Image: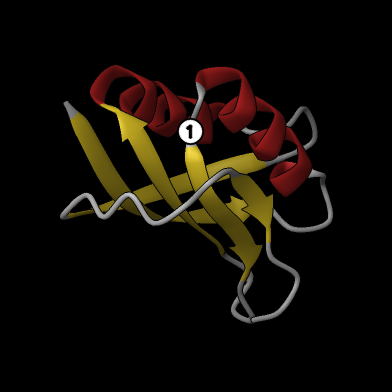
Amino acid sequence: MAKRAHVFISGKVQGVYYRSYAEDAARRLGIRGWIRNLRDGRVEAVFEGEDEAVEEMIRWCWQGSPMSRVDEVEVEWEPYRGEFQDFSIRYRY
């Protein structure tokens, strides 16, 4: 069964390679979607994939990159859309 999560990560998550490490983790888990920085200092992501892979990706969000400090991970569950072919870093807000 596939699922979709819209995620917002707070803490020291910009300027610490969080998105790059997340991209590696997502590709390893077969997750499709995207990740980007927000102007307010958070990171936003959309993950689509098999149930367990999405759950594992959300657990990864709490760990983050070696230099990050994650204070909060907000998850909004959305209907699966299957709209992505891969996982990418978005560079615009």
Quarter of the rendering containing residue 24: top right
Side (left or right) of 58 relative to 12: left
Going by the numbered disc 1, the residue's amino acid type is Ile
Side (left or right) of 4 relative to 62: left
In the figure, 8 relative to 39: above or below? above
Q: Position of residue 36 (x, y in %)?
A: 63, 63
Secondary structure type for disc 1? loop
Residue occupying image coordinates x 39% and y 56%: 83
Q: Quadrant of the C terminus?
A: bottom right
In this picture the colour scheme is secondary structure
In the figure, 45 relative to 87: above or below? below
In the figure, 7 relative to 27: above or below? below
Quarter of the rendering containing residue 40: bottom right
Q: Position of residue 87 (x, y in %)?
A: 60, 45
Q: Which residue is mark 1?
A: 31
Side (left or right) of 41 relative to 58: right
Task: Answer few, some or many: residues within 10 Å of disc 1's Cα (few below 14, many 20 plus, some between 14 and 19).
Answer: many
Residue occupying image coordinates x 64% and y 70%: 41
In front of the other: 4 or 37: 4
Q: Quadrant of the N terminus?
A: top left
Quarter of the rendering containing residue 53: top left
Residue occupying image coordinates x 37% and y 42%: 48
Q: Position of residue 60 (x, y in %)?
A: 51, 26
